[in-house]
Image (cartoon, rainbow, N blue to C red):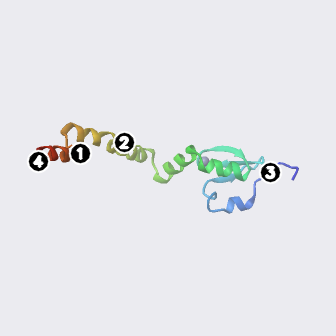
Amino acid sequence: MATKRKMREEWLLNNEFRPWLRCVEADSTRARCITCKKEFGAELSTIKRHKASHMHVCNEARQQQGMDGVSTSKVSRKMFTILVMPCTFCHYQLPILMPKDYSQSYR
Ligand SMILES: [Zn+2]
């Protein structure tokens, strides 16, 4: 175990890694993510860490959605729900305040 860790064939066959993990032909101690176009050390912990990284998760999600434009519009729709909806409730003083008003008028 004195030698550097090398890429293992079983990792390349693992369903978790198979879609994006490739070996670096010139250097068997390095692995490559084809989704992020990034290289890192061929150690299981490094590979797992890369899989869980924000960058990889984002890139994978983007790839699954096919186009960048689709994911952007999905994000902005979500932002609309988070940011604009509460403002709309405040602006029109909708149901959030209603129960309080009712309880006051019936006392
Ligand atoms: Zn990646």
Q: Which residue is mark 1?
A: 96
Q: Which residue is mark 4?
A: 106
Q: Which mark is residue 79?
A: 2
Q: Could you tell whether 55 is left or right of 39 in the image?
A: left
Q: Amino acid at mark 1?
A: Ile
Residue at figure coordinates x 65%, y 48% from the top left: 49
Question: Which structural element holds mark 2?
Answer: helix
| Residue sticking out furthest to the right | 2
Residue at figure coordinates x 75%, y 54% from the top left: 7
Image depth: mark 3 or mark 2 in front: 2
Q: Amino acid at mark 4?
A: Tyr
Q: Which residue is mark 3?
A: 5
Question: Which structural element holds mark 4?
Answer: loop
- Label 3, label 4: how many angstroms apart (C-alpha)? 75 Å
For the residues bearing labels 2 and 1, Cβ distance under 8 angstroms: no
- Label 3, label 1: how many angstroms apart (C-alpha)? 59 Å
